[in-house]
Every structure is written in structure tokens, then in C-alpha cells.
Amino acid sequence: MQPKPRLFSGMQPTGELHLGNYLGALKQWVELARSGQYDCIFCIVDAHAITVEHEPKELPKRILDAATLYIAAGIDPSQTTLFVQSDVPQHTELAWYLSSVTPMGDLGRMTQFKEKAENRPHVSASLFTYPVLMAADILLYKAQVVPVGEDQIQHLELAREICRKFNARYGDIFPEPQPRLSTTRRLMGLDGQAKMSKSRGNTISLLETPEEMWAKLRPAFTDPQRQRRADPGRPEVCNIFTMHRAVSPKEVVELVDQNCRGAAWGCADCKKVLHEHLVKELAPIRERALELRQKPEQVLEILRAGADRCRKLAEETLTEVRDALGLGARLPS
């Protein structure tokens, strides 16, 4: 029997996951894992989280919270491997080796680096080399498939280029990873000004109550040209409609589209229907997460088992890489 193609993806532990994290990545991970088509490895990429200033005492809690919500959302350890990046030190070792074939000019062109570095008094070298570590995360497991959202496409393209450069110079070690684009359009924050971000306060947390969700949805930004209820709407530019497409049944999405364009519904009507389907989608996740929070050792054991498997896979790859590079004390061949 042919082994399943390996799939890898990860997210930073930014604290309580929000709707953008879930609809943009986590929901797709769960669907891909349940399909049974892939050997899925999912990672909490905590080493990426230290590229900007952070509070060390808070990071362990953020890691545990992220793992808890991954599992609550449907990441099943019997179907997938879930682990924490820093528990597998081969990630940072491979990143150093890959940096030897990565031009500085390529890193300087990364849009996310420019955005995150703007107006910061301190810009770390790790923020600049972030994409090399991302490439190492993927190539370490010889992943063939990488689910990505729009904001990570540029980084994945660089990872593919790093893969090609390394293979050309040192031998055919890594398969070139292929993107699996998210079917959900990039979600803007509730303020309509930027993508959902906890630091901007424009998110809905996966653990919020129905009442808390509605308090945030009610004033959320919609189509700026729709000033009155009688004005026809443009669902294609409305963030509320983007959320509908991610959580509401197809027939509801079609109804929202029709009633918005025809001005039969106001924005508040669209939000009420969205709220109903958000509650239906997120309530089981919230309930499961609150249960798991009472059993942190169970979550940690899943992470330990995942790291054990990944260290073995990682060391197999690093053995090949070190040999290809000529590293290590040994007699010349």
C-alpha cells in the first residue's frame, strides 16, 4: 500500500483562538484530517511567536490554550499528529542549514516582514528570517501538501524556492511542497480596517458566549455604501457575507445574497442570521474546550506523544541533510 501524502501546517499560539483562525485555517485542517487522504501533522509554532516582543510567563498558557482549542475543534490525535514546535529542536537546526541557500534579497521582499517591521523600535533578525524557519517546519517532515491562506502564499512560495535551491546544490532530499489554498476568503476584522487580530480587538473568540458574540456582531462593519435599509447591498464586499459563506448552509447563503442585493433585508437581519449559525457552529467547540480545560494533563500527553513521533521523523531527515552537507566528524570519503 502506498503511504499517504504528508500534510503539514501550523499556527502561532496567540492566546484564545478567534473566528479568523478557525475559519481561515483550523476548520480546513479538521476537514482534511477527516478525509483520510493525508498523513496530517499539525504544529503550534511557538518559536515563531518570539520573533516579536512577548511575555515569557504567558507563552506556556497560550500554547496550552491553543492545543485545547485545536482538539476541541476536531483535531483528533487518533487521526493526526499534534505537537509543539520547540519540543522538536530539529526545526531550528534545519532552519540554520536552509539559511545557507536563502538570499537576503528574497527575505527583504516579504510583505509580512515589511508590515510587521513598520514603526517598530526594535526589529529582530528572527522576524527577518521567519520564512526560513517556516520552510524548515515544512521540509523537516518532507511534507507534500501545505494548507495556506492568502497571507501565507508568499512565504510558501519562498519555501518552495528554498527547497529547489537546496536540492539543486546538495541532492534531491526534499519533495517540493504544494499549496492547498483555503476555500475561505481572508476575513477582515469586525471593524473592517484590517484582518482579524487579537491585538486590534476586532475579533470574536471561539470561547465567547452567544450574548458576547452578538454584542460584537451588532455594530460590525458591513458594506460602506449601504447607508439606508433601502439601499441595495453588495455581498461580495461585505465581511458579514464572507462569514456567512464559511458557516451558513448553501441555501441560507443564497437567501442572504438575494435579500441583501434586493434590499429586502437590512444589515441587522443578515447579522442575526449569521449569529444563529455561528452559535450552532461554535457552541460544541466551546463546550468541549471548557471540558478539556479541566484536564490539562490529557492535552499535554497528546502534545508529548506528537513530539515523540515528530522527533523521530525529524532526525531521519536531519541525518540525510547533515550527510549531504558534509557535517559531522568522520573520515573523508
Image (cartoon, grey):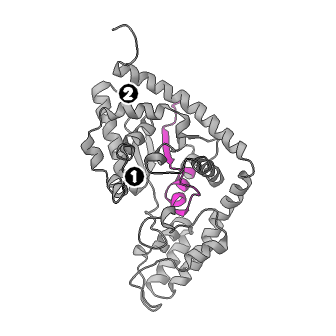
Of callouts 1 and 2, the N-terminal one: 1
Q: Residue at x 42, y 35 (%)?
A: 139
Farthest residue, direction front: 121
- Identify the amino acid type marked 1: Gln
Span of residues in magenta: 1-30
Image marks 1 and 2: residues in contact by CB distance under 8 Å: no
Tell me the tag on residue 267.
none
Q: Number of numbered discs present?
A: 2
Compare residues 36 and 151 and report the one nearer the observer. 151
Q: Which residue is mark 1?
A: 152
Q: Position of residue 108 (x, y in %)?
A: 28, 48
Tell me the tag on residue 173.
2
Residues packed near mark 2 inside 10 Å, few (<14), some (14 to 19) or many (20 plus): some
**Magenta run includes residue 140:** no
Compare residues 279 and 17 and report the one nearer the observer. 17
- Identify the amino acid type marked 2: Ile
Q: Position of residue 103 (x, y in %)?
A: 26, 39
